[in-house]
Image (cartoon, rainbow, N blue to C red):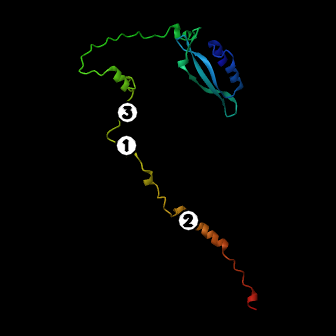
Amino acid sequence: RFRDVAATFGLDPSGEISGLLERRDTWSGRSVLWPVVGTDLKIPVDLAALPVYGRSRAFEGFRGFGVARASDAVVDPEAIGMALVPNGRAPATPEPQVIQPAPEQPKAEEPRAEDAQASDPFKGEVPALTIVPKQERRFADKVIRLAEHRQPANDKGLSTLERSAFREIGERLKKESAPVEPPETETAEA
């Protein structure tokens, strides 16, 4: 339960989020300070939740999300994150590697460092992925011209289905509007 977790880690000291959970309403924009495993830091996490109901309209729980703002981390005086490490061990941190610079070889003309930094907006960072188009297929081959596959818009003719429906309507109208001939009476003979 959230209330137990919040009490253990000090997530909701005012009980505001617990109250929102009990009301079973949609809510958002509530922040908690979440401990980071293996550190003495807490980061603000903005939470939001939406109640979930089953087919019988019975409350089943919440679905939600959180946005962690790691750049706004604060130091946790209780260092709760250190207690969250498995087996009580601190996470292994790699030892800093000492890299020996290669001996410099004389170059004919070295560009000045100021010029290189000004012309390189990425500051020497190489792209993680380079996309190279395949040479065997041109981009024009991928284009499908829809106008070639459509019937011309200036085609004034009716489709077969429309033509048969039009004829049927015409036949019904003829039957309904045909003058009813009065039966010949004996008055015409007299």
Residue 63, percent from left and from top = 62, 27
For marks 2 and 1 on the same chain, the one whose residue lies earlier in the sequence: 1
- Circle 1 — which element? helix
Residue at x-position 66% and y-position 73%: 177
Residue at x-position 49% and y-position 58%: 153
- Circle 3 — which element? loop
The extreme bottom residue here reads 190
Foreground: disc 2 or disc 1: 1
The amino acid type of the residue labelled 3 equals Ile
For marks 2 and 3 on the same chain, the one whose residue lies earlier in the sequence: 3
Label 1 packing within 10 angstroms: few (<14), some (14-19), many (20+): few
- Circle 2 — which element? helix
Residue assigned mark 2: 164
The amino acid type of the residue labelled 2 equals Ser
The one nearer the camera, 54 or 26, is 26
Residue assigned mark 1: 139
The amino acid type of the residue labelled 1 equals Phe
Residue at x-position 70% and y-position 33%: 57
Residue 101, percent from left and from top = 31, 12
Residue 119 falls in image quadrant: top left
Residue at x-position 34% and y-position 23%: 116
Q: Mark 2 near mark 3, Cβ–Cβ under 8 Å?
A: no
Q: Is residue 180 above or below residue 86?
A: below
Residue 76, percent from left and from top = 58, 10
Foreground: disc 2 or disc 3: 3
Residue assigned mark 3: 131
Distance from Cα at disc 2 to Cα at disc 3 = 56 Å
Residue 142 falls in image quadrant: top left
